[in-house]
Amino acid sequence: MNQADLPRWATSVAMPLLNLLSALLVAAGVIYLLGENPAESMGILINSAVLNPEGLGYTLFYAATFIFTGLSVSIAMQAGLFNIGSEGQMYLGGLGATLVLLALDHTLPGWLLIPAAIAGAVLFGGLWAFVPGYLQAKRGSHVVVTTIMFNFISASLMNYVIVSHLIPDGEQSPASRVFAESAWLPKLNSILPVLGETPLNISFVLALVALVIYGIAVWRTSWGYQLRAAGLNPHAAHYAGISISKTIIVTMLISGGLAGLAAVNPVMGSTHYLGLNFPAGAGFIGIAIALMGRQHPVGILLSSILFGALIQGGFDLSLEKPNIPPETFIFIQGLIILFCGAMENLYAPVLSAMFKRKDK
Amino acid sequence: MFDDFQFASILVSTVRNAPVLIFAAMAGLFAERSGVVDLALEGKMLAAAFVSAAVGFATQNPWLGIAAGIAVSAAIALLQGFVSITQKGNQLVAGIALNIALSGLTFVLAQFFFMQGGRTPDLGAARLSTIVLPGAEAVAGVPVIGWIYSSLLSGHTILTYLAFALIPLVHWVIYHTRFGLRLRAVGENPHAADAAGVNVELTRFMAMLTAGVLCSLSGAYLSVVQSGFFLRDMSAGNGYLALTALVFGNWRPVYTALGCLMFGFFAALQVQIEGVVFPVIGKVPGSLIQMIPYVVTVVVLAGLMAKSVAPKAIGQPFVKSR
Amino acid sequence: ADPKFAVIYDAGGKFDKSFNQSASEGAERFKKETKIGFMEVQVASDTQTEQVLRNLARKKVDLIAAIGFGQAQAVQNVAKEFPATRFVLIDGVANGANVSSVLFKEQEGSYLVGVAAALASKSKKVGFIGGMDIPLIRNFSCGYAQGVKATDGKIEVVQNMVGTTTAAWNDPAKGGELARAQIERGVDVIFAAAGGSGLGTLQAVKEKGKLGIGVDSNQNYLHPGNMLTSMVKRVDQAIYDSFMQVKNGTWKAGIVYKGVKEGGVDWALDKDNRSVISADIEKRVNAAKQDIINGKINVVDFREAKKCPA
Amino acid sequence: MLSWYPEPMQPAVEFQNISKRFGAVQANRDVSFSIASGSIHGVIGENGAGKSTLMSILYGYYQADEGNLLINGKAEKIHNSHEAIVLGIGMVHQHFMLVENMTVLDNVMLGGEGGFRLNANRKKVEAELREICQRYSLDVDPLDKIEDLSVGVQQRVEILKQIYRSANILILDEPTAVLTVQETQSLFDVLRLFKEQGKTIILITHKLQEILDITDEVTVMRAGTVVGSVHTRDTSKEQLAEMMVGRPIETQLPRAPYNPGKVVLDVQNLNLINSQQVSLLKDISFNIRAGEIVALAGVSGNGQSELLEILSGMRLPGSGQITLDGAALPYQGKKDADGLPARYRELGIAHVAEDRLRHAVVKNFSVLMNSFLGYQNKFRKALGLLDKKAIAEHCDKMIRDFDVRPADPALRIALLSGGNQQKVVMAREMAASPKLILVGQPTRGVDIGTIESLHARLLALRDAGVAILLVSVELEEVRALADRILVMSGGCITGELKVEEFDATKIGLLMGGLHKH
Ligand SMILES: Nc1ncnc2c1ncn2[C@@H]1O[C@H](COP(=O)(O)OP(=O)(O)OP(=O)(O)O)[C@@H](O)[C@H]1O
Ligand SMILES: Nc1ncnc2c1ncn2[C@@H]1O[C@H](COP(=O)(O)OP(=O)(O)OP(=O)(O)O)[C@@H](O)[C@H]1O
Ligand SMILES: [Mg+2]
Ligand SMILES: [Mg+2]
């Protein structure tokens, strides 16, 4: 019964795989009920999400955004804060980048412009998370509640800003103007032409760097140690001289900044304008990714790619199989989170029974 | 300037808005007082809204629809219980996962059965009818009292009355029954409850079951009462708002209900002041007015309220070990 | 060989009982008449739009119909890459020698239903419920208000928007609640331009025994007797026409404005609302329609004027 | 004395070859002994010997891997506490099992409410409780909330619960760890009453005197096994200690002559008023010199904890002056104490917190990670990176010097026994070579072998010239360690004595606040 009795490969490889398989099995059942062949469908899905290079490009493109929102939620969780507001912070981050670009894209050269816009995204995302952080630290308002509220507020605010101020004259689409090309993030297909016409851009590389920095900062630095201590036992952290309010505020700033960074990929790497509701739920998916990836860099990376693949592959599949609406993959996402993120020990008894038998 | 501003209308609207939140928040209250974080209110609402509408339509009987909604929502709550209590999984993950899964599944099923883009057909006559309280017409003319009786109190569906009746009922169950005592103990200190001979897992499961039933009424209210059909994602964040009301109300039934009413009130207020020309600032854009309920919540939480204290064992699976 | 066609719906989806659905109806009509099929997809984000457009263009689809202003930028990008593929964009403008942009003068149709609303209102208060505060929806409301005021300057127009997130188009409860609130404020005719949320509005209007006005496709059938009319926006016709033009080889790029004159927008009168449209209303609405066609009435386009005269 | 029994007494509890294992730890190995009905049976052993585990098996909390359990001669499988309660077994746990935000009444009723509607019974149970309190002279108000009660009273609530449920076999796991001498005495009075009524009592304690005072028989455990059972009247402290530890225990530790140096800590007119305007500390003035141990004696809840918190930087004083080596501590102008303990540590104040699990360790960190809690900045390299090598060496040294068992730095500290957790904390605070060390309840719940070694450490530190402030409710400990004793009562220092003047009665009176000046 005890997980500790199992060898490491069983707990860290076999069990997650079994869980993933279980989720996919349920999904296959649903696809069958919808009147399609599950095996064929899964084949199409895997092919278009992973095997086909252009599809893989899209998978990684979506993953880049999710890595950032996943990191945003994860770092807050390390400090014991449940930041539900990554969605809103990402939305504001998009505004930060856009304001910089609208002001400067015709004056600054690209190598200055892009970092400046990224800084804008980080700043706006960070500040949007700062307020809930400050209120938690100084006024004791629950960060869960305030960040939910701030999501709603950001939707209203962004709606107002975009519709009333950013729509260029003569346009009716609720979006800013398209940025000058110097502000477009370099695409990876210029180095890897095999990727074809995918929006995959350097923000994926940035995301990988962010994962590494996150891993080092949380597990290898004194700051990360204080962060985790505060998250696990605030009383002990206070005893240890760690300033709780400072930890909360700084963590929320960073969490918001990472959420802001998540906006860079879609806004500067793909659409090249700020559109209404562009985060499209990426902030919420970040919660799922942080939880499923256990706030560990490798876990975050893998779950981000998994979610990216589901979005890309599922979309292609629903193109080919009109009976399978794209929403099916939202359902499958939920199943995967449920099986891999919340029932991680489902197969532990079975596996330990197997090992016990072998021992005897 | 406030010629259009009708307080009476706001109150009526508040009463109409509140049940969705009250049912969901009371559901959350049972789950969370027992120590299980219930982020899946949204998902259960959606599932119940869909099933109630679909079965209600198929049978042309709203009651059968609501009953089916209750059964499904309760089953989901038990699944959530299995994951969070038996499997001792992460309760937040379980909640979010269920929300995502059900958002997708309700659409897929609705599309599969009705082919209307994830919408169920109109219930038409198969909706709950409103109840006109006896004598409501007669006293309608009496100033104030007549209005309160005939417009504010009369003319709602049975679910609305049930929602308001639930407030004292939940209070009674939580504070004055054996189930409530065990529930609170299990959410506060499961080890103590266990040592006192209370079956922690059973108690939590019963709490989840109650939560499932109550939450289904919130969904049924959305589809069978308010809209007359199911539409994808029609819970529109109300599950999260209900959780906010719960935190706001310190996990106590009456205060939580007040939180729900506050949301209902500000939602109604916001409707009324959209387009009103204010002195000095003039006409505030609608999108900014939409923020009002949320800004008020933040301000109230930050300013007026004492720190809210969650049940101590919330979110932690009960493991007999150090 | 027969030309290949495709329709890309925006996030509202094919069954939105609104302009996506209308587009789908146009394509279906074409299919029925010509036996030439078409592909259809729904996209969830702007990135996906581009991906789908490119995929379809690669599959050598002859005409891709992109529904909704959200696809404008993507169409413009992809059109550049695939000069041989033709695109028709509904509700938005994209440049390119192979793109036809179809814009509707919603303000004109809205004006007509505004006239009808003003005449049908007994309380001298009419309502408008929009999905989200965006230029397109404001154009509806502004045209409506112009029609109302032109008919009776004393009538008040109460306006509400459902929300600010994408949920705003899928929140019938809120749509209904707004309607009830407006009715409590004395409103007795409500024009709903709010996608799925509008269904809730019309439902509430029916319950309260007031009059509702549908949008985009003819929604009169939803609640016969309680639907004053619908402001129809003939996306179906636009799609049908472009498909036909491609088939017949008469397709042209450029920007097309479709108003009352071009049959792009209109008010709906059929058996379902016959009973509520009096002869007087019918006469005066049709007169207004005639005046718009012959230029006597110029309905201001909010998107150009940036503010509403009414 | 009777030499003949009408029939052989059935043992109330009999353990037969009980074994229980947690992962790699064998907590109980082949444990067999029996407990005579109507007796008071002591169970002693070092930290981690497996006492609590065995009792938890009896109470249905864990299931034994192997072996049998006989209750009143009948083999029983007890799957949960509900079944244990049904069998008439009651348990007072090492950590109180009370729901803090509920009343005494509700805590007592919990699990045995007697019907769905509570109110139907509340009045009846309340009256019954008042009656029980009277009968057993337990001073508890059934309507008080647990969180408002001192530990001593909470303890009484636990007892009350068991009396109300008329448990016939009562397990008490270290009930006296947090009690004062007086409280312990009244607890024992109740236990004797129980015995007269024919109830069976199992008492776990680390205090051998208590074993001698009250038990009839005692079983000694070591490393999961039973070393032996003896009749109390046939044994002595020394014998028990040796059975437990496997070697003789020094009762009198060597110490250098009292020769204090300059004043290290000086406190003048310290006051503290809480948010409800209750005065917690009143005009506290005292000093500590280098090389002396000053003990604060007193019933817990009389201001010692607050004083310790202020001196460690965890809380701000209301008014007054605190100087360390003549320089004022840097709390002036601060709005709250957030982060202050770090400054104090830098100045050379180490702090062994009273509440181990709440303050002194992060339960979910390993021993290694806990080994520098509070000193995280000392192990920082460039870029804020932690110096892993230095930390590993530091931790290994701590584990070796203090004989922490098991000697595994990667083990989650929650899995260590209380005594070993305390060793880690003490080692960590001492490793910082402080000028002043604040030590709160250093040996609460710690076995005598470990107590001996911790005491020896503190004395060595004193001899090395460190100023030590000891807060302890154990007069034995105060006597063994202190050079000077300050007695606190009601937030005031009510008296001061040298250790040579040690007089338990006088201190008791001062603790009662009788000698106010
Ligand atoms: N240990 C328990 N933990 C949680 N709920 C329980 C427990 N025991 C019983 N219940 C609930 O209480 C209801 C009544 O059970 P039961 O008849 O065992 O009560 P009881 O033990 O006689 O009550 P009391 O303890 O108040 O005398 C059962 O339906 C069950 O749901
Ligand atoms: N739930 C558990 N999981 C893992 N190990 C455990 C668990 N409970 C106890 N242990 C281990 O079993 C051994 C016996 O622990 P137990 O608590 O029974 O000791 P004890 O004699 O009561 O000690 P103390 O005097 O400190 O209370 C210890 O090594 C302890 O670390
Ligand atoms: Mg123990
Ligand atoms: Mg102990």
Image (cartoon, coloured by chain):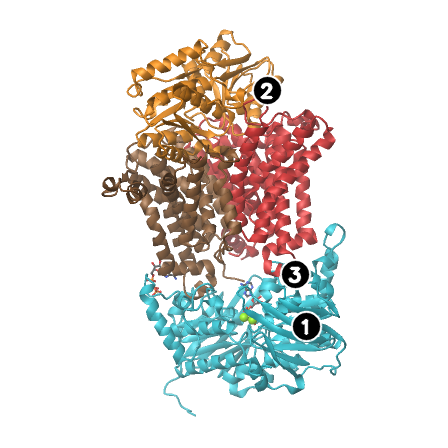
- The quadrant of the picture showing ligand 1 is bottom left
Is B273 placed above or below D38 here?
Answer: above
Q: Report which quarter residue D423 is drawn in.
A: bottom right
Among the chains pictured, the one given cyan colouring is: D
Check disc 1 and report the residue beneath it: D267
Residue D25 in view of the camera: yes
Classify 10 Å Cα crowding around label 2: few (below 14), some (14-19), many (20 and above).
Answer: some
In terms of depth relative to the viewer, which is nearer, C268 or C146? C146
Q: Check residue A240 in the rendering and tell me which mark sits there, or answer none.
A: 3
Among the chains pictured, the one given red colouring is: A
- In this view, the mark in front (1 or 3): 1
- In this view, the mark in front (2 or 1): 1
Among the chains pictured, the one given orange colouring is: C
Q: CA distance from mark 1 to mark 3?
A: 23 Å
State the image coordinates of residue D383 (x, y, percent, origin top left): 74, 50
Instruction: Describe the element under mark 1 as helix, strand or loop.
Output: strand
Instruction: Describe the element under mark 2 as helix, strand or loop.
Output: helix
What amino acid is found at the position of numbered circle 2 in the picture?
A: Gln
State the image coordinates of residue C183 (x, y, percent, origin top left): 35, 32
Is C266 placed above or below B56 here?
Answer: above
Q: Chain of mark 3?
A: A
Is D186 placed above or below B123 here?
Answer: below
The lab-note entry on whether marks 3 and 2 share a chain reads no
Q: Check residue C76 in the rendering and tell me which mark sits there, or answer none.
A: 2
In terms of depth relative to the viewer, which is nearer, B54 or C94? C94
